[in-house]
Image (spheres, grey):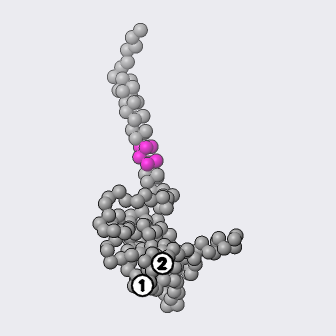
Amino acid sequence: RYVCLNRPQRRIRMLLPCHALAVAAIQIFVFSENWAFAKNINFYNVRPPLDPTPFPNSFKCFTCENAGDNYDCNRWAEDKWCPQNTQYCLTVHHFTSHGRSTSITKKCASRSECHFVGCHHSRDSEQTECRSCCEGMICNVELPTNHTNAVFAVMHAQRTSGSSVPVPCVPVLIWVFVLPFL
């Protein structure tokens, strides 16, 4: 049976699939945008880089300068190898007395840049600066916020002149949590 439709009805029937497709495309865009900006990215589960290392014991750090928060710093960090004259990842965190971050700087650092770790409160500006250094591939995920985590964390001790093998060094935080249970 053939149904005769006038021109406006035919036009509407032809536009319905296009309308449904447009609505679906907009919903996909909105959901994908929310997913992309979600602040639940797991920065701890970062895979080691696949590109060849430029020199032995190469490493990468999260890097940013004066970022507003830790998430943005880690998310937009440059993905490049640290220079050969660096051994650690440095994080400098400035925040108010209410704990609100005002600036975050993360970078590759030499041993001399890591001598001044810890937290220092400035009475003039009512801000606190916490600095931490760590050793290892993209180890500077978190921000130092107090004397407990504003530390110089190394994975192994430096070689001494009488020893040819580095002595493993257990980080301080492990002692705090494991020792009471032994």
Residue 155 drawn at (x, y percent): 48, 73
**Quadrant the C terminus occupies:** bottom right
Question: Which residue in the structure is indicated by mark 1?
Answer: 161
Q: Residues within 10 Å of mark 2 (few under 14, many from 20)?
A: few
Task: Tell me if residue 1 comes above or below residue 170 in the rendering.
Answer: above
Question: Which residue in the structure is indicated by mark 2?
Answer: 157
In front of the other: 14 or 127: 127
Residue 99 among magenta residues: no
Mark 1: which secondary structure?
loop
Q: Are marks 2 and 1 in contact (CB under 8 Å)?
A: no
In front of the other: 57 or 95: 57
Q: Quadrant of residue 174?
A: bottom right
Q: Is residue 67 in sight in this rendering? A: yes
Residue 49 drawn at (x, y percent): 37, 59
Q: Residue furthest left?
A: 54
Residue 110 drawn at (x, y percent): 38, 80
Label 2 to label 1, Cα distance in Å? 13 Å
Q: Amino acid at mark 1?
A: Ser
Q: Residue furthest bottom?
A: 124
Which circle, 2 or 1, is nearer the viewer?
A: 1
Residue drawn at point x = 66 percent, y = 73 percent: 179
Q: Is residue 92 in sight in this rendering? A: no
Q: Residues within 10 Å of mark 1 (few under 14, many from 20)?
A: few
Q: Quadrant of residue 84?
A: bottom left
